[in-house]
Amino acid sequence: MAEKRTGPVPYEYVCTRLRVRKSKLLAREDYLRMLNMSIPEMTRFIEETQYKKEIDELGTSFSGIDLLEIALSWNLAKEYQNIQKIAPGDLKRFTQSYLRRWDIQNVLTILRGKAQGITSGKIKEILIPAGELDRVILDRLLKEESPERVVEALKAYTMYPVLTKWLGSAIAEGSFAHMENALYRQFYGDLIEEAMSGFKGGRNFLDYIRLEIDMINIRNMFRLRADRIQQDAREIAIPGGTFGVDEFQRLVNREDHNEFIDAVKSRIKLRPLLDMLETIRQEKSLRETEIELIKFQIREMESMSKRNPFSIHPILTYLEKKKYEIINLRALARGKESNLPTERIRGFLVI
Amino acid sequence: MADMTLEMVQASQLGMKALGAGIAVGLTGIATGIAEMSIGSAAVGATAENKDIFGLALLFTVIPETIVIFGLVVALLLLF
């Protein structure tokens, strides 16, 4: 298919649109207000924002937390599909590559569901068709009877070799964790390759991927250290960022917490990240550390999108912020449903 | 050059003035177009998301028109 002509200034249009959309996302005050609301009140509140269409559409078939959860998933998928439509040329290519992570998540959800004998209807409720695999393909996958048949149906996709390699052991062990690690390693490897293949704007994309890989590696290091499980950390490390695979293993195995933070800091060049690591040097809980890392990543992405206002960065910043808006709303709704105290729910929010 | 009559010199000066005026308007017009290109597409993008800012977006889009107005003023000064 011939490349769509996008004119001399395609970036300004889409980047400005997404900046406006970003400004319409829920503000910190909105979350704080919602903390004191019940689920029906929350539903009414977000109905007045960008979620009106989904809540109106689903209001007749669902209620309570189901309505909220499905409306959020639908809105996210719709938003992501829409961005793929308006992004021009190379930005579209990068956006699509970035969104392939949802394919991994959806395929793993289907495989896990199928392996545990969960009905297609239940699995479908939690799928988010935001990537290359759209609703039609996902429906086709859901109709397959066993995980093996699901994998066979994905023959034409890049993840197929990894899926076939790990499927046998995943079913035997009853855990898809190794497959998940392998899929994400392949995903980030592909992203780096694509960013370095010489397309216009690839450098900016690469900056973002490196930041994300670093953040994931740092987060995983904290998680592995908190778990204190003796396992091969090399499999979990994602290569391509600041930390090499062997270095990752060494850092995870460091006994002393302060030494570990110092070792991580010695490899980092970003000044704000150094300051942030200093603040989490005091023994904070893993959850607080993770939220701090996510907040840092979003802040860093915001400053990248200010430095390069007409590049892939504003698009990626919006996509990430939107994702966390959905995650926050879901955490709020689930917390309310389980009658958690307000302070506890507040701790789970990325605001 | 020596055999040029006064009429020929006057006609040549008039021609040069007209040429200068044309260049002034033409080049500033192109410059305005280039400047408005980015602002215009960003303005359309912003208006697509939020219709309330149409007036403001339009105002920002036409600000580079001042460049071509300068060109026009220079052209008029040259001609009259």
Image (cartoon, coloured by chain):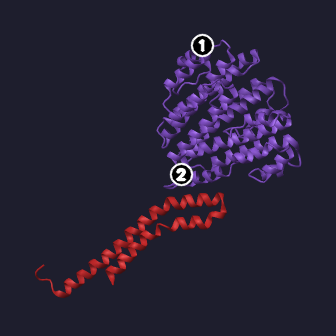
Q: Give the quarter of the image for residue A249.
A: top right
Q: Is residue A21 visible?
A: yes
Q: Tell me which amino acid carries mark 1.
A: Glu
Give the residue at x 86% y 35%: A339
- Above or below, A208 against A263 in this view is below
Give the residue at x 80% y 50%: A45
Numbered tag placed on residue A119 in the rendering: none
Count all numbered tags in the image, as a single digit: 2
Mark 1 closeness class: few <14, some 14–19, many ≥20 residues within 10 Å: few
Residue where numbered disc 2 is placed: A11
Host chain of mark 1: A
Q: Tell me which amino acid carries mark 2.
A: Tyr
The color chain A is rendered in = purple
User: The N terminus of chain B appears in which quarter of the rendering?
Assistant: bottom left
Residue where numbered disc 1 is placed: A255
* Residue A15 placement (x, y as % from top left): 57, 51
Q: Is residue A201 left or right of residue B6?
A: right
The color chain B is rendered in = red
Give the residue at x 67% y 19%: A226
In-front residue for pair A38/A177 = A38
Q: Is residue A17 left or right of residue A348?
A: left
